[in-house]
């Protein structure tokens, strides 16, 4: 195996650049994308790094083309990735739905920016529902991983290729503009690259029907009972997946804290700071539950941790989307509060601390049906 | 004992599956499938070929032609084919697309596939309407033609002009071979197979994008007898879509 291209043991990289290295280490040898801020460092770095590993790089004419070129590379058996940001990911939903139906593995990086519409290029977590509830038409899911640092972008992107192949499903890396643009050290020491010449075979790949019967992949299933039978199998696959992969998380802070903060990505970064250096009045009161995967969502682990606290405070860069999963996990066992911003910025530690103090003082309302923040 | 010498001059190509077509009587898809199967066999590439099937009447091409197939979302076949061909340049990669699929919703994909000079062959069926969805106007519908969305006939003012795909592609440097043939008579049908074989040859020589446009009858949605549909191609379609080799970089 050629290893000339491997990154040094330690690099100062943006999260976007780290995703390129994670992909190459994960055996990605085909990359196709369309420019969009704030992920341009991905397509920029990949344009020369992919050549160094002898893979294929294509700058497509649109995100619609990107996802369908991905479909082609995936059905040919190659580990393939695209990178984009929210509006571009919307354009890909048709292709993702087809790939989910036909069991085509691929990795999609969404460096989330503000929406709806053209929105803004700043960080956001407004695509949570889109990512975790399928996103396109039909009844399907994608695996969704949620890194909160450059290091984790690299590690989760690498492992995403294994998950995608194992479960034959599109897999999404749900980052955000801040994680993507922030530059920090990334440690590669001890990270083993996938040996692309010795990967598990893909007997379903289309390679030309030499010496075997021909085969085809389709999502049009118009025969009597065909679609229902196909979808039953798809749902059985998701159940197997959920049984063997109940989700990943990291929990930090004192076990006897009153408030369990729940956040992923950039907001988790702010919450972690609060837990590690709590302001006056919150010493020992805060703990953080940080999902590293949001589909599968670590429901059971969250409930277990939440039962140790008096209440839960979910923090997001949107009007409240993941908070629904938090409420699903707790099934009413603990009150769930929400703090968030709906555009152009990460919630500050002061903002979150104020909310926590209000909760402790009995001045805040839990997330409701219409008003999640409780103060609208 | 007399010795008789029998020579088979016409038979079903092995790659064409023994399965009844779902196409309507007099439809051009059956002819197009047959010559595509013959071309795959005669080129010796059937076992190294991957086709990309469209959305439309051609969607289940994979039931009839025994090569590996990938189904594409509507109009996206040239993008899917790009992914396959770049992953496995040794394969013969083709798309089979109608005029709604290629010339309307897939405009971005085929133009840029051609402009990148992808070594892919598109078989483009032009019957002047959307047949699968009940006969609506396509970009290729002639002016004046009645369809289910142009009940009084296509007008320039409301619907614009028929799109000539081969002529549109010819100036692009990435294209290597473009030919339009009408599936109206045995001579033309044989010529269509020759065109497909040439396109395959150019593809495997790495000369760029190749497209064979087949003017094809749709008696059901043209609401006429199959023989009259053939006559209509000769009288009404050929003046708008002239047949012949529109581009050949080998010349």
Image: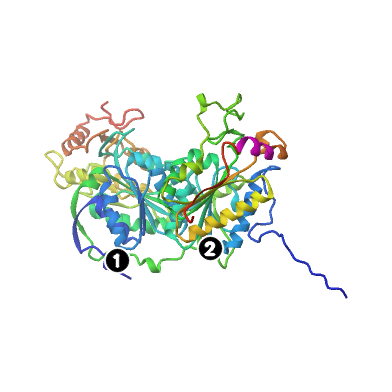
Please report the bounds of the magenta region as a residue range.
B229-237
Determine the CA span between mark 1 and mark 2: 35 Å
Chain containing mark 1: A
- Percent position of residue A213, x then y: 59, 63
Few, some or many residues within 10 Å of mark 1 (<14, 14–19, 20+) = few
Residue beneath disc 2: B48
Asked whether, in this view, residue B160 is left or right of residue A29, the answer is right
Task: Point out residue B152 in the picture as x, y percentages from the top left corner.
Answer: 60, 24
Percent coordinates x, y for residue B49 in the rendering: 53, 60
Pick whichever, B13 or A163, lies toward us.
B13
Residue A132 position by quadrant: top left
Q: Secondary structure at mark 2?
A: helix
Residue A316, compared with residue A298, is above or below; it is above
Disc 1: which residue: A192
Task: Characterize the local packing of mark 2: few (<14), some (14-19) or many (20 or more) Cα atoms within 10 angstroms.
Answer: some
The reply to whether the magenta stretch includes residue B222 is no
Q: How is the image coloured?
A: rainbow
Task: Name the foreground residue: A151 vs B236.
Answer: B236
Residue B63 visible, this angle: no
Asked whether A308 or A357 is in front, the reply is A357
Question: Which residue is outermost to the left?
Answer: A280
| Chain at numbered mark 2 | B
Helix or strand or loop: what does disc 1 sit on? Answer: loop
């Amino acid at each position: 195996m050629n290893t000339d291209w491997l990154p040094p043991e330690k690099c100062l990289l943006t999260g976007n650049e780290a995703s390129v290295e994670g992909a190459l280490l994960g055996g990605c040898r085909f990359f196709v994308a369309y420019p969009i801020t704030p992920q341009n460092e991905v397509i920029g770095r990949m344009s020369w790094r992919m050549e160094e590993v002898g893979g294929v790089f294509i700058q497509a004419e649109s995100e619609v083309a990107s996802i369908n070129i991905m479909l082609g590379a995936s059905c040919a058996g190659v580990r393939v990735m695209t990178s984009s940001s929210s509006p571009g990911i919307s354009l890909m939903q048709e292709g993702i739905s087809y790939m989910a139906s036909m069991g085509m593995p691929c990795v999609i990086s969404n460096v989330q920016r503000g929406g709806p519409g053209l929105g803004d290029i700043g960080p956001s977590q407004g695509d949570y529902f889109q990512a975790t509830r399928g996103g396109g038409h039909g009844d399907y899911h994608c695996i969704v991983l949620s890194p909160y640092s450059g290091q984790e972008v690299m590690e989760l992107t690498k492992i995403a290729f294994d998950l995608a192949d194992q479960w034959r499903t599109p897999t999404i890396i749900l980052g955000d503009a801040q994680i993507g643009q922030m530059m920090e050290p990334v440690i590669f020491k001890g990270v083993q690259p996938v040996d692309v010449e010795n990967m598990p075979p893909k007997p379903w790949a289309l390679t030309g029907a030499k010496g075997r019967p021909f085969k085809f992949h389709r999502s049009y299933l118009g025969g009597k009972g065909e679609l229902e039978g196909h979808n039953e199998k798809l749902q059985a696959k998701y159940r197997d997946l959920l049984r063997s992969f109940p989700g990943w998380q990291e929990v930090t802070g004192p076990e006897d804290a009153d408030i369990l903060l729940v956040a992923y990505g950039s907001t988790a970064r702010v919450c972690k700071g609060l837990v590690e250096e709590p302001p006056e009045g919150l010493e020992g009161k805060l703990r953080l539950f940080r999902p590293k995967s949001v589909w599968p969502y670590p429901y059971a682990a969250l409930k277990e941790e939440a039962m140790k606290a008096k209440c839960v405070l979910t923090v997001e860069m949107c009007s409240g989307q993941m908070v629904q999963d938090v409420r699903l996990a707790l099934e009413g066992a603990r009150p769930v509060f929400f703090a968030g911003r709906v555009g152009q910025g990460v919630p500050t530690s002061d903002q979150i601390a104020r909310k926590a103090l209000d909760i402790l003082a009995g001045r805040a309302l839990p997330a409701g049906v219409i008003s999640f923040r409780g103060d609208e | 004992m007399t010795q008789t010498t029998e020579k088979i001059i016409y038979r079903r190509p092995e790659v064409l599956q023994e399965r009844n077509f779902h196409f309507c009587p007099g439809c051009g898809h059956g002819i197009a499938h047959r010559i595509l199967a013959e071309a795959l066999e005669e080129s010796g590439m059937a076992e190294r070929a991957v086709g990309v099937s469209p959305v439309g009447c051609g969607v289940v091409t994979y039931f009839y032609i025994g090569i590996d197939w990938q189904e594409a979302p509507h109009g996206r076949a040239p993008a899917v084919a790009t992914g396959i061909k770049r992953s496995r340049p040794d394969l013969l990669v083709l798309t089979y697309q109608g005029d709604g699929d290629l010339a309307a919703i897939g405009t971005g994909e085929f133009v840029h596939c051609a402009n990148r000079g992808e070594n892919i062959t598109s078989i483009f069926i032009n019957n002047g309407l959307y047949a699968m969805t009940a006969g609506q106007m396509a970009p290729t519908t002639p002016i004046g033609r009645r369809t289910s969305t142009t009940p009084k006939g296509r007008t320039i003012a409301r619907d614009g002009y028929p799109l000539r795909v081969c002529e549109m592609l010819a100036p692009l440097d990435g294209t290597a071979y473009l030919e339009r043939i009408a599936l109206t008579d045995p001579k033309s049908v044989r010529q269509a197979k020759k065109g497909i074989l040439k396109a395959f040859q150019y593809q495997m020589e790495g000369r760029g994008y190749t497209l064979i446009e087949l003017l094809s009858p749709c008696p059901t949605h043209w609401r006429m007898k199959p023989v009259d549909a053939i006559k209509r191609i000769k009288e009404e379609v050929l003046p708008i879509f002239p047949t012949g080799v529109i581009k050949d970089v080998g010349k």
